[in-house]
Amino acid sequence: MKLILLGPPGAGKGTQAQRLEENHGYIQLSTGDMLRAAVAAGTEIGLQTKDLMARGELVPNDVVVEIISERIDLPDCVDGFILDGFPRNVAQAEALDEMLADKNLKLDAVVEIAVNDGILINRIEKRASETVGGPREDDNAESLKNRLVVYHEQTAPLIEYYHNKGVLKSIDGMADVDEVSKQIEEVLKQR
Ligand code: ADP
C-alpha cells in the first residue's frame, strides 16, 4: 500500500501514519521528522533547513525530493509506505509522480484529513504545552500562523491535483482519533 496523507499542520497525519505503521507495517515517511533529525544531528541539510523550519517556511523542494527518493529505495518500503508531510506543493507532487514512474511504483490512494483552522490552532497549542522536553521550535503562534498560510497557498492545491487524478479520498479529521483511523481503514479496504 502506497499512501499519501494530506492535511494541514495539526490534522493528525503523524498520529494516523504511526497507527498504520503499527497495524500494517507500512513505513511512515515523515519529511518533518526526517528534517528535525537532520537539524538535531547537525548535518549539512540540517544546517541548511533549521531557520526555514523554525519560521514555518518550506525547505527547498530538491532537498525533500532527494530525501524521499533515497528512503523509498530502502528494502523496508517494499510492503508499503505512508507519505506524511510530502508532497507539500505542486512541484513536489510532480517530482513524486516522476520518481514513482521511474521506480515502477504506483500510488494507491491520497487521503485528505480535513480539519478547519480554528481547531488546528487549539490542537497545536495543546501539543506544544504537552510535549515532553519542551515544544517543537515551530510550535509557536507566529510560526503556526505562517504554516497555515503556506498550507493554504501551496499545499491545499494538491487536493484538486489528486482529485483530478481520481485518487483522492477525503475524510473528516474533526472526528476523534479512533474514528479517523476507522475512516482511513475503510478507504484502504476499498483499494
Ligand atoms: P506540520 O505538518 O505540523 O507543520 P511537519 O513536521 O510536517 O509539521 O513539518 C515541519 C516543517 O518541516 C515544515 O514547516 C517545513 O519547514 C519542513 N518540511 C516538512 N516537509 C516538507 C516538505 N515536503 N517540503 C518543504 N518543507 C517541508
Image (spheres, rainbow, N blue to C red):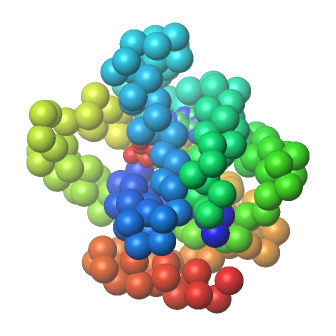
Return the x and y of residue 81 as percentages of the image width and height: 58, 58
For the residue pair 78 and 140, the one nearer the viewer reads as 78
Quarter occupied by residue 116:
bottom left
Residue drawn at the location 35% of the way across and 40% of the way down: 144
Regarding residue 11, the answer to whether it shows in the image is: no
Q: Residue furthest front?
A: 75
Q: Is residue 10 left or right of residue 93?
A: left
Return the x and y of residue 176 as percentages of the image width and height: 28, 78
Regarding residue 141, the answer to whether it shows in the image is: yes
- Using the image, determine if residue 47 lies above or below residue 137: above
Q: Quadrant of the N terminus?
A: bottom right
Quarter occupied by residue 143:
top left
Q: In the rendered picture of this protein, how many numbered marks are placed on residues?
A: 0
Residue drawn at the location 49% of the way across and 78% of the way down: 184
Return the x and y of residue 181 as percentages of the image width and height: 40, 77
Residue drawn at the location 52% of the way across and 63% of the way down: 26
Residue drawn at the location 57% of the way across and 52% of the way down: 76
